[in-house]
Amino acid sequence: MPLRSSTYQPLAAQVAARIAEGIAAGTWQEWLPGERALTATLQVSRKTLRKALLQLQRDGVLVTTHGLGHRIAAGTAVPATTPAVASIGLLTPESLENLRPYTALWVDELRALLIERDVRLATFAGHRFFNAHPDKALARLVQQNPQTCWVLAHTNEQIQQWFCDQHVPCVIAGSCHPGLDLPNVDWDNFAICRHAVGAMLRHGHRRVAFLTKQSQRAGDLESEAGFIDGIRRFSKAEVEPTVLRHDGTVEGVNRTLARLFNATVTPTALLVANPVYYLSTITFLAQRGLRVPQDVSLVSRDDDAFLAYVTPAPARYSCNAKTYAKRLLHPLQTILRGEAIAHPVHRIEATFVPNPSLAAPKA
């Protein structure tokens, strides 16, 4: 939400004016968003924002209550008959700079596509929305930050269930949990993992494993199901599907891999979910004196820009961020038009990129 440049008006005054305009346009009703969300939306520092909020308090536009936030004063908000500015809210567990580069790329692409259509993208982040009981936090978020539609990224079942129960318009950037009828866009993780098993078996591997985060995200559950299905479908010999789950920390990945490679019989090929854990895995193997692919072959379920700098080049599945943003735009446009989404589930096929990290096992 860019601010208008002015030679004579201080930045805090510009910010105050922009907030007042947003209130008048119906962008915010009853309550303003939290300060962190506002600084991200307005692209200003918290110090500048607080000066602007103080000015709005003095002008009688806002009433600030410690611990609750900034309420829009009675009579300030625009009547309900005035149409609100079209806005998409993006909800993530962490701020974009702390998420994978791939996520930041598709978010930037989606933002650009929406700007072309005079729709703004507002981002909201926080682990309080992603715990086991997010109802109160989500209710306050949606009430204080009315959006035309929400994009839910990296979500768990509890968040999806709340949006479904409350009938809040949304699109899942990922997979939807079974039993929930929400529009969702994701790569075909089931097909990716099943194909990866076939690729490893065709190279002669018979001891294969899947390393993934202990997660209740639907896409990860679909990945496990695809891996197991691939073992059963493509394996003529007796190959046991081994799924290894870690806690998402580097230490957790190392502990999980240590248990695996301390065993008498170890895998010759690993499929790894999430490129950051691919880096952890290849580092662990190097510390153990195990070479890729001579001792252990690796395949990455996902792609990310930094994998281009890894040696040997990782075999992986190409998941273009621009393609993903464009596919995500389709259901959002349908909701913005006020139309029903005919096909809520959308899966995108990924392209396998064969690279030297996957080779035949040692004789």
Image (tube, helix red, strand yellow):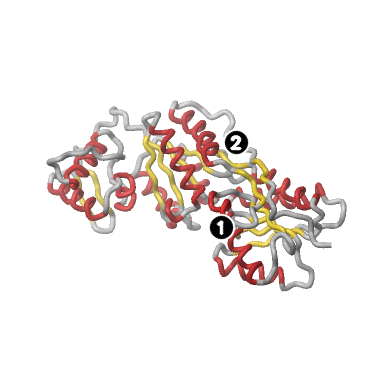
Q: Which residue is mark 1?
A: 276
Local secondary structure at mark 2: strand
The one nearer the camera, 289 or 4, is: 289
Q: Quadrant of residue 74?
A: top left
- Residue 42 x/y as whole percent: 29, 44
Q: Is residue 87 visible?
A: yes
Q: Amino acid at mark 1?
A: Val
The mark nearer the N terminus, 2 or 1, is: 1
**Residue ID at (61%, 69%):** 254
- Residue 78 x/y as whole percent: 24, 33
**Horizontal arrangement in the rendering, residue 338 relative to residue 71 (left or right):** right
What whole-number distance in Å separates the C-alpha atoms at marks 2 and 1?
A: 26 Å
Cβ atoms at labels 2 and 1 below 8 Å apart? no
Q: Quadrant of residue 249?
A: bottom right
**Horizontal arrangement in the rendering, residue 162 relative to residue 278 (left or right):** left
Q: Amino acid at mark 2?
A: His
Label 1 neighbour load within 10 Å: few <14, some 14-19, many 20+: some
User: Can you name the residue that lies furthest to the right here?
Assistant: 237
**Residue ID at (28%, 58%):** 67
Question: Where, quadrant-wise, is the N terminus in this rendering?
Answer: top left
The one nearer the camera, 202 or 243, is: 202
**Residue ID at (32%, 32%):** 84
Q: Nearer the viewer, mark 2 or mark 1?
A: 1
Q: Which residue is mark 2?
A: 346
Local secondary structure at mark 1: helix
Label 2 neighbour load within 10 Å: few <14, some 14-19, many 20+: some
The one nearer the camera, 130 or 296, is: 296
- Residue 158 x/y as whole percent: 52, 51
**Horizontal arrangement in the rendering, residue 256 relative to residue 148 (left or right):** right
**Residue ID at (61%, 58%):** 278
